[in-house]
Image (spheres, rainbow, N blue to C red):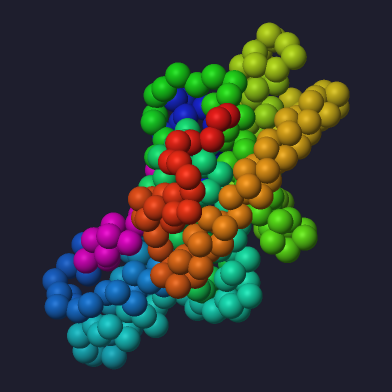
């Protein structure tokens, strides 16, 4: 997910996509392995930064140098962090969660969906455990009203709402860290209530960092109830959207499990199949 916030004040640098990871690797390899197919590297390097890729190339080159030979593709793959394969059941739960973010976002119609993806493996020890994501195109500068923020929160709440519909409850992956859906939604709701004049008061608190927003919440316990009310309202909204379009959710999940990556247009096509109209849901 794209991290929400005051997008006009922050520079967002996304992780490199498959094409970019391939290009970054070729850059750091120089002329080595020029005719090689890097598809396996690309497959297992989702979530890597440019620095991560540089380290893999450097470690592979060191291994080959110590062996007194040219670098080989096995050297490159051996230099990558060990990954663990997700069980089919867990992959399905990830697909349900991420497909729901995409579904709610498309139905609301606020942000163009760029792509939807899930991973088959994750880094076994430490590092970023990127299991998938719904990727939306966010304009760096645009006019945003209260309803825009509500739409973003609803989209973020879509993952746990879908898990409740499909499994009866949601898992622990939606909260607990600064990049989680619940934390991001909580920060947006905090901004609405305390900084943007879009809550019960026009008073504006300065500072929109994660630490600053947490300080505001801790200092004002009454605010917790207001934030919780926003989250619960948008959670209910997302859950209703998903329940009304559950066949579309399952179509997207099935295709995502089969292919692991879908373009935004492909997801929209799957959602529109069987629907009487293509207009976005009213917010």
Above-or-below relation of 269 to 55: above
Q: Nearer the viewer, residue 213 or 190?
A: 190
Residue at position x 29%, y 90% from top?
A: 67
Residue 229 sits in quarter: top right
> From the viewer's perspective, is 144 left or right of 150?
left
Question: Could you tell me if residue 181 is visible in this image?
Answer: no
Residue at position x 58%, y 50% from top?
A: 245
Q: Nearer the viewer, residue 55 or 68?
A: 55
Above-or-below relation of 210 to 116: above
Magenta segment: 12-26
* Magenta run includes residue 186: no
Q: Position of residue 84 (x, y in %)?
A: 55, 78
In which quadrant of the rendered image does the C terminus lie?
A: top right
Q: Position of residue 205 (x, y in %)?
A: 67, 16
Q: In the orientation shown, which residue stands out farthest toward the right?
A: 222
Above-or-below relation of 220 to 266: above
Residue at position x 62%, y 43% from top?
A: 241
Residue 154 sits in quarter: top right
* Magenta run includes residue 14: yes
Q: Position of residue 158 (x, y in %)?
A: 63, 47
Q: In the orientation shown, which residue stands out farthest toward the front?
A: 276
């Amino acid at each position: 997910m794209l991290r929400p916030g005051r997008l006009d004040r922050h520079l967002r640098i996304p992780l490199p996509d498959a094409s970019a990871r391939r290009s970054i690797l070729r850059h750091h390899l120089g002329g080595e392995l020029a005719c090689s197919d890097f598809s396996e590297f690309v497959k297992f390097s989702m979530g890597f930064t440019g620095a991560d890729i540089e380290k893999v190339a450097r470690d592979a080159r060191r291994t080959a140098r110590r062996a007194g030979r040219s670098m080989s593709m096995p050297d490159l793959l051996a230099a990558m962090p060990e990954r663990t394969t997700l069980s089919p059941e867990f992959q399905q739960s990830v697909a349900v969660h991420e497909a729901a973010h995409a579904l709610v976002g498309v139905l609301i119609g606020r942000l163009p969906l760029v792509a939807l993806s899930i991973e088959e493996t994750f880094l076994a020890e430490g590092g970023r455990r990127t299991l998938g994501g719904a990727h939306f195109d966010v304009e760096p500068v645009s006019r945003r009203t209260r309803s825009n923020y509500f739409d973003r929160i609803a989209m973020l709440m879509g993952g746990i709402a879908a898990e409740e519909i499909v499994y009866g409850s949601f898992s622990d992956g939606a909260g607990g860290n600064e990049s989680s859906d619940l934390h991001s939604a909580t920060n947006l709701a905090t901004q609405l209530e305390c900084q943007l004049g879009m809550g019960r008061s026009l008073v504006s608190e300065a500072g929109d960092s994660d630490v600053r927003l947490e300080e505001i919440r801790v200092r004002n316990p009454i605010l917790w109830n207001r934030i919780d009310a926003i989250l619960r309202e948008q959670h209910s909204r997302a859950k209703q959207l998903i329940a009304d379009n559950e066949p579309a959710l399952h179509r997207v999940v099935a295709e995502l499990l089969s292919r692991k990556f879908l373009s935004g247009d492909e997801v929209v096509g799957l959602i529109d199949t069987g629907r009487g109209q293509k207009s976005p849901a009213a917010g």
